[in-house]
Structures are given as C-alpha cells and as structure tokens.
Image: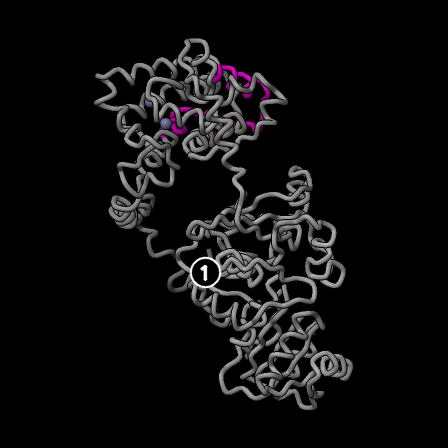
C-alpha cells in the first residue's frame, strides 16, 4: 500500500471481498450461451467440475511429485488389465439392443469414423462424444487408476496427466479415419499388435458393429474371438492406399532447422500461418530430422479435380545452387529413362513478375543475383519496351550481352519499381526514393523488408483456385492458399498435358503459362504490405 493512498489506489471491487469473482458471472453466462450453438463443450465442463471436486476433497492431489516410477507402472498395469477388460464387457453390453438403442447408438450414428473436430459441428457427427450416462461409466472406469494410485500414495503428475493424455490421444487416433501407424512398429515388437489398436481396427467396429470391441488394446477381442477377420487385411490395404501414385510432385526442402515445425504433419497451427523465423528450437528440430531418418518424406497431399498432388520434403536446409544442378537438368541427365517431366516454374515466375508491374510503368531498376530468371525477366521487359537500369556496371554488361538489349546503370535510383533478387542489401534498399517504391522479388526467398514506406510483393506466387482441396497449411512465408510459381507450374503442366521439361536453360512460353494459370482459376496475389 502507498504511504499516502491517493484516489483509485484500491481496486474498485475491493468492497466485494471474495465475492469479486461473481463479476465474471455475466461473462461466463454469455460464453455458455454462445457455446451452446457452437461447441459441444459438455465434456470439458464435466472434466472441470470433477477435477475441482476431487482436488478440493483430496488434499494429497495438490502436492504431487513430478514422477514416481511405481505409480506409472501401476497405472499402466491397471489400464492394461482391469480397465481394458471391464471396458470390453461394458462395450459388449452396450451393444445389447436395450442399451444400444438407448445410449450407444449415438456413438455409432456415423458408420465412418470421424475426427473429434466434427463433434462441434453437428450432433449427428458426435463420434467421440457419448451420452452422459455412458460418460459416467467411462469416468468410473478411468477413475480406478487415477484415484487408485492417489489413494495408495504413488500417483505423480506424470502418471495423472500421462494417463489422461494417453486416453485422449488413443481415442482421437482411433477415430481419425486415416491409417498411418507404420508397419515397422509391429515388426520391431510383434506383440504390440495386442496392445495397441490402429485407426483401421476401430473403423471395423463402426462398420461391422459386432467385432473389435476393445478400448485401445485388441488383446481382449483376440481372447474372446471377436476380432474382425479382415482387421489385418484392412490395415495392410489402408497403408497401401497411402502410396497412391501422384500426378504432380512438388519437391521442396526445409529452409531453416525450425522450418520443420512448419510442416502440417506435426504442428498444424504453426503450418496454418506464414512461416517466420522468429522462434528457435534448434535442438528439437535436429531431433525431429534425426527421427525421420534424414530421408525425403511426404509432407502434404492435395486434390485438384482428379489430379493428385503431393509435396515431398527433402530434409536438408539448402540444396545445390541452380548453377550446380542447372535447374533440374542435371537430374534428367543422370536418369535418361525418366518418364516424369521436370518443371522449375521459371516461365510462370517471369509471368508473375511482369504482371506485378503497375500498368504505365516505363522504367524499372533491376538488382539481384544474375540467374536464368533474371535474364528471362530483363529480356521480357526490354521486349515490352520498358527501360531497365541496374545498380552496377558488371550487372549491366552481363545483362546487355545476354539479352542483346540496352541496359543502363542507374545514377539516381529514382525508379518507382524495383525488381529484386538474391543479394539485395539494406544499403541498396535505403537508396530507393521515399514513399512510393514497389519491390517485386523474383528470388526464392523474400527480401528482408528494410523500408517501412515501400511496398513489397510476395515472392512469385498466385492464389489457388477454391477447387484445390486440403490446402490448409502455408507454403513457407506465403499466406494461406497462396502457392509458389514452381508448385503451380507443375500443376499447370499436368492439367494441360504439356509433355515437356522446363529446366536447365529452357524456359516455357511466358504468355501461354500465364493464360493457362488464369484459365484454371489461379489469381494474382495482392501486395504483401
Ligand atoms: Zn460400439
Ligand atoms: Zn468409436
């Protein structure tokens, strides 16, 4: 307290004492009224009430150790033994027509297992949510290890939260309708088959009703002869379906160690936002790369009409420079029998840069590493009778020679449109006139934005048509549903049936690919700032 308390020293609700929490009442009521139509949060409310109740009547629950091996082992044994066994018979009882029609049919309202996220959308999709009475029965079962270990004094935060996380994880995994448990897991430890179910195993319970009753461990179905005979075959065929042959593969690589978090596979919420290298967890990144075995992996699958699109990620942070692999030509030379066409997307990148230049522009400033793209862009600009100036004489000489056109060296840097690539420095950006400069990058990586008063376009990219499905993650630093020129170019080649490579020094018809992109519903992006 201040020595001479002035006006408003005390919080205004001090007179309310402990009743101050009542102030949150209207907010809670409002949230509940809103949630009634949006979320099935009954289970969250019940969990909250139960945890509050047991925490208040069991003083020991407030001071738990982080880890106790005996408690973890007892929890695991109690689950694998009585809990799984009791659940198995409870579940069979729930399939008796009396209980089935009154309770359990709710869980079976969907023959296809659906992820838990569907629960909130429609009551008919409540695959993981059960009627209240069923939840009470399950809570009594799961309470045996949770409260049992607490009563005998061996519980720990690890056994308590580990067990709840295990139940939630297994439940969601079993209903995800997507078989992803790798075969090697069962070959390393064959008995695991009896102790861990898979999404395809539980999906058979939803479609066949009278088989695969087990909670998470198929052991009791095997003991009582209720295992669905097609369990193994369905597991195998579901995994094979994953290896469907794609029509288009976008080959990409990690940009920084932490970019591995940006993959949709692991952290969907990170992947749904443009990647920024603000946070760093390198040790974990290296670990994830190590676990993956350092081999190329499937990062994303999309559909566009009948076209199957896949993105494969090479777990390296940089790949050979374009000069070394000659934009993929090196790969074709090494594999002369290759039936696949390699497309680097240069022509579309040129088209996007050209179409980002405001109409009426008569002069541009060019600055960036001289690549295949750089020469193609400058050549196209000169053909369109736009004056091109460079920062340095060496660039000017090389560009003039390659394009057989007239390129100048800028003296004043007053051009309002700057086409920029790798190597653009802060000092160079500072030279741009105040307020109106538009930076159009043609580089793979975006330039560092050093000017608050200038506008920066995205790296060459376009907005995907709405018919492109399953596109929930951001491609590196690009916004949601914006694809890089290289990725779109491959799709366009497949859609149009263009049976040609675009790599090495070759470049596709710029106007033709732009027209195709627009015709197939790809749209230009807006300026990023
Ligand atoms: Zn059932
Ligand atoms: Zn189920």
The kind of secondary structure element at disc 1 is loop
Residue depicted at x 31% and y 48%: 24
Q: In this rendering, does residue 19 appear at all?
A: yes
Is residue 173 one of those drawn in magenta?
no
**Magenta span includes 58:** yes
Q: Name which residue lies at 70% across and 90% down.
A: 411
Magenta: main secondary structure equals helix
Classify mark 1: residues with Cα within 10 Å, few (<14), some (14-19) or many (20+). Answer: many
Q: How far across and how far down the image is residue 399, in percent?
A: 72, 80
Judging depth in this view, the residue of 312 and 18 nearest the camera is 312
Camera-side residue: 68 or 441? Answer: 441
Indicate whether 206 appears above or below 385: above
Q: Which of 495 and 461 is in front in this view?
A: 495
The region drawn magenta spans 53-80
Residue most toward the bottom? 411
Q: Where is residue 331 in the image (x, y as percent from the top left)?
A: 71, 53
- Report x, y in % for residue 332: 70, 54
- Residue 510 to residue 263: above or below: below
Check disc 1 and report the residue beneath it: 464
């Amino acid at each position: 307290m201040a020595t001479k308390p002035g006006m408003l020293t005390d919080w205004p609700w001090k007179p309310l004492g402990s009743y101050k929490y009542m102030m949150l009442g209207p907010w809670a009521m409002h949230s509940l009224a809103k949630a009634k139509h949006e979320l099935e949060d009954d289970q969250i409310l019940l969990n909250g009430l139960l945890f509050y109740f047991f925490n208040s009547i069991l003083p020991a629950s407030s001071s738990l150790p982080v880890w106790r091996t005996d408690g973890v082992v007892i929890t695991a044994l109690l689950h694998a033994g009585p809990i799984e066994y009791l659940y198995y018979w409870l579940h069979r009882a729930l399939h008796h027509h009396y209980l089935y029609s009154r309770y359990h049919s709710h869980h079976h309202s969907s023959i296809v297992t659906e992820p838990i996220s569907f629960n909130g959308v429609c009551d008919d999709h409540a695959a993981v949510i059960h009627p209240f009475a069923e939840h009470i029965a399950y809570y009594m079962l799961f309470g045996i290890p949770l409260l049992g270990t607490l009563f005998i004094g061996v519980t720990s935060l690890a056994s308590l939260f580990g067990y709840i996380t295990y139940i939630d994880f297994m439940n969601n995994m079993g209903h995800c309708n997507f078989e992803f448990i790798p075969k090697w897991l069962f070959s390393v430890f064959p008995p695991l088959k009896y102790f861990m179910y898979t999404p395809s195993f539980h999906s058979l319970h939803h479609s066949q009703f009278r088989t695969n009753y087990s909670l998470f461990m198929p052991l009791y179905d095997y003991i009582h002869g209720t295992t669905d005979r097609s369990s193994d075959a369905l597991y195998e065929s579901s995994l094979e379906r994953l290896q469907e042959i794609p029509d288009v593969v976008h080959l990409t690589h990690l940009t920084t160690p932490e970019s591995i978090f940006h993959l949709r596979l692991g952290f969907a919420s990170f992947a749904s936002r443009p990647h920024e290298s603000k946070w760093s967890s390198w040790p974990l990144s290296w670990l994830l790369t190590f676990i993956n075995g350092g081999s190329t992996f499937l990062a994303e699958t999309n559909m566009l009409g009948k076209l199957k699109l896949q993105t494969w990620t090479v777990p390296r942070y940089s790949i050979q420079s374009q000069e070394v692999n000659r934009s993929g030509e090196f790969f074709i030379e090494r594999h002369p029998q290759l039936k696949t066409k390699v497309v680097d997307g240069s022509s579309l990148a040129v088209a996007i840069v050209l179409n980002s230049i405001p109409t009426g522009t008569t002069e541009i400033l060019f600055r960036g590493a001289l690549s295949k793209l750089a020469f193609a862009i400058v050549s196209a600009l000169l053909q369109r009778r736009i004056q091109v100036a460079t920062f340095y004489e060496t660039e000017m000489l090389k560009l003039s020679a390659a394009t057989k056109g007239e390129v100048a060296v800028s003296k004043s840097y007053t051009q309002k449109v700057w086409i920029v690539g790798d190597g653009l420095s802060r000092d160079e950006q500072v030279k741009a006139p105040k307020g109106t400069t538009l930076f159009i990058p043609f580089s793979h990586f975006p330039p560092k934005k050093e000017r608050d008063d200038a506008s920066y376009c995205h790296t060459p990219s376009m907005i995907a048509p709405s018919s492109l499905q399953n596109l929930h993650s951001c491609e590196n630093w690009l916004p949601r549903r914006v694809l890089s020129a290289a990725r779109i170019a491959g799709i366009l080649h497949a859609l149009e049936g263009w049976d040609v490579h675009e790599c090495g020094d070759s470049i596709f018809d710029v106007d033709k690919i732009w027209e195709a992109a627009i015709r197939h519903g790809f749209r230009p992006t807006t300026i990023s700032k």
